[in-house]
């Protein structure tokens, strides 16, 4: 295990957790592995290969699960998701992929509300809810997952990066049923994830993720999938008049709040300020901001009180209505906004954006610029119709439902491997990691540490952020 890109604080925390994983009894060992994955993922710590830990914990857990207790069946495909949501791109990706396959079921391993279940019933004939109940230990939960996994020939993972329970269950199921094939959809490809040792095929969605995959010590065959947009082929070639942005007044951007949080010197605020100053009657609407939680927006809002509109959330109908009135759509920054950027483009709205350190998710990134000044120049001198048509052709190849389905089906049926078509068109820049940022831990992890090992809890607390104790006490006070 190399700590090449990690700072001293991070290394101390990771080593403490690795020690607990190694020395704890099996159930605690698995739970400590989960929280290690959570810290690596949520803090975007640039440590991508802990495959040795993954392999050891699978071997350790297998010892406690009797292989003779299970019946092996040969059903079709089983999609596995940790916790689906009504909003966000990860669940939409899984839904679209499910439409490309006939014989499939779904298992949810953590939780799901009734609204989400009602929606997913439109995509899957059978949904299995296999949750870990209060006071249920890790081994028992994993054993239940193995029971279901052995009923299928192929498993398509759409799991959270820290979901070690599903990964262990897959590893054990593969030891019992040698012909079982695991496909991993790497939807959160910008950060650490478990699953590198148990996957047979690894589906990529971006150039950035592909470069990260080089650091994961993958055992799987890597193949490009892409993020599908569920539109008919002709919709990808509708006329989009970029000349209209010369008269643009109403700008809009939408995404989860974290995608707009400034990171070092990367921020969308200079662009928004310039756009609001660009014309006297310019307006910018931002969907996905909670001004209380996302305090970094406060100064900008006070400066442009009436011209900057911030929405915490909008209903789907209101969202469609609001975005349809926009003259121009801005991609989120410093983190790009997934398919929302491309979908607005396909709906006929001219799109702009700043280039990001997270790159290669869509050919539409060709339209992005390096600086605010270049974007203002782009508004004054928009790209030609010929340039837009060439971008549309690339978007079709990467995002068209029919093209993604072709790649998915051929990989599932005959093991075909596909290259990423964006490599020739998107600037393939070097990875840049931020190694000196503070580490945060979740309240759930703090409660787990407090219960299992107070000494380790205190050690980790003072290495990372002692304020988590205050956060914990406040939440406890609110609940009481």
Image: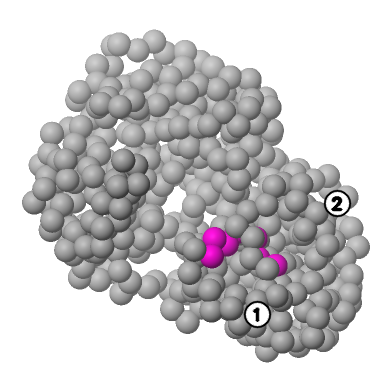
Q: Viewed as shown, does residue 35 lie left or right of 271? A: left
Q: Could you tell me residue 101's position as x and y percent?
A: 66, 30
Q: Could you tell me residue 292's position as x and y percent?
A: 49, 63
Res 434 seen here: yes
**Numbered disc total:** 2
Residue at horizontal 75%, vertical 74%?
283
Closer to the camera in the image, 437 or 69: 437
Q: Could you tell me residue 73's position as x and y percent?
A: 47, 13
Q: Which residues are magenta?
A: 285-291
Residue at horizontal 29%, vertical 46%?
476
Secondary structure, mark 1, is loop
Give residue 230's quadrant in the image. top right
Res 334 seen here: no
- Is residue 124 depicted above or below 292 in this figure? above
Q: Which residue is mark 2?
A: 235
Question: Whole-Å distance between the Cαs marked 2 and 1?
Answer: 37 Å
Secondary structure, mark 2, is helix
Give residue 27's quadrant in the image. top left
- Badge 2 density bin: few <14, some 14–19, many ≥20, Cα 10 Å: some
Tell me which numbered mark, 2 or 1, is placed earlier along the sequence.
Answer: 2
Circle on res. 225: none
Q: Viewed as shown, does residue 452 lie left or right of 165? A: left
- Is residue 398 depicted above or below 145 in this figure? below
Q: Could you tell me residue 30's position as x and y percent?
A: 24, 37
Q: Pick the quarter of the image with the N terminus.
A: bottom left
- Is residue 440 depicted above or below 380 in this figure? above
Q: Which residue is mark 1?
A: 304
Can residue 128 be found in the magenta stretch? no
Residue at horizontal 19%, vertical 36%?
28
- Badge 1 density bin: few <14, some 14–19, many ≥20, Cα 10 Å: some
């Amino acid at each position: 295990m190399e700590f090449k890109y990690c700072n001293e604080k991070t290394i101390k925390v990771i080593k403490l957790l690795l020690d607990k994983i190694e020395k704890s009894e099996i159930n605690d060992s698995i739970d400590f592995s989960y929280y290690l994955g959570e810290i690596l993922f949520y803090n975007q710590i640039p440590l991508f290969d802990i495959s040795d830990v993954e392999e050891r914990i699978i071997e350790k857990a297998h010892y406690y699960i009797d292989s003779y207790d299970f019946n092996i069946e040969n059903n079709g495909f089983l999609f596995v998701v940790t916790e689906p949501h009504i909003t966000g791109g990860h669940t939409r990706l899984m839904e679209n992929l499910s439409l490309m396959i006939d014989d499939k079921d779904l298992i949810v391993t953590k939780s799901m509300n009734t609204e989400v279940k009602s929606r997913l019933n439109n995509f899957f004939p059978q949904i299995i809810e296999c949750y870990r109940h209060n006071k249920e230990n890790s081994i028992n939960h994993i054993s239940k997952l193995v029971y279901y996994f052995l009923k299928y020939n192929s498993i398509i993972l759409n799991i959270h990066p820290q979901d070690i329970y599903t990964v262990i269950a897959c590893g054990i199921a593969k030891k019992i049923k040698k012909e079982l094939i695991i496909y991993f959809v790497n939807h959160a490809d910008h950060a650490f994830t478990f699953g590198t040792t148990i996957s047979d095929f690894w589906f990529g969605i971006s150039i950035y993720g592909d470069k990260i995959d080089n650091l994961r010590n993958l055992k799987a065959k890597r193949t490009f999938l892409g993020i599908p947009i569920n539109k008919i082929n002709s919709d990808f070639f509708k006329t989009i008049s970029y000349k209209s942005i010369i008269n643009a007044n109403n700008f809009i951007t939408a995404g989860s709040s974290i995608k707009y949080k400034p990171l070092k010197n990367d921020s969308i605020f200079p662009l928004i300020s310039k756009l609001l100053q660009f014309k006297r009657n310019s307006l910018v609407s931002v969907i996905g901001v909670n001004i209380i939680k996302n305090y970094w927006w406060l100064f900008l809002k006070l400066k442009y009180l009436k011209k900057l509109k911030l929405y915490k959330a909008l209903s789907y109908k209101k969202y469609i209505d609001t975005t349809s009135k926009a003259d121009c759509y801005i991609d989120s920054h410093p983190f790009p906004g997934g398919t929302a950027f491309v979908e607005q483009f396909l709906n006929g709205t001219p799109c702009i954006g700043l280039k990001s350190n997270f790159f290669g998710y869509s050919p539409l990134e060709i339209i992005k610029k390096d600086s605010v000044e270049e974007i203002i120049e782009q508004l004054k001198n928009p790209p030609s119709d010929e340039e837009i048509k060439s971008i549309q052709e690339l978007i079709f190849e990467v995002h068209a439902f029919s093209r993604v389905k072709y790649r998915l089906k051929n990989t599932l049926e005959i093991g075909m491997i596909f290259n990423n078509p964006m490599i020739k068109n998107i600037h393939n820049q070097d990875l840049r990691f931020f190694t000196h940022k503070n580490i945060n831990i979740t309240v759930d992890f703090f409660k787990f540490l407090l219960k299992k090992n107070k000494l380790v809890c205190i050690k980790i607390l003072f290495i990372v952020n002692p304020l988590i104790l205050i956060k914990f006490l406040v939440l406890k006070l609110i609940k009481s």
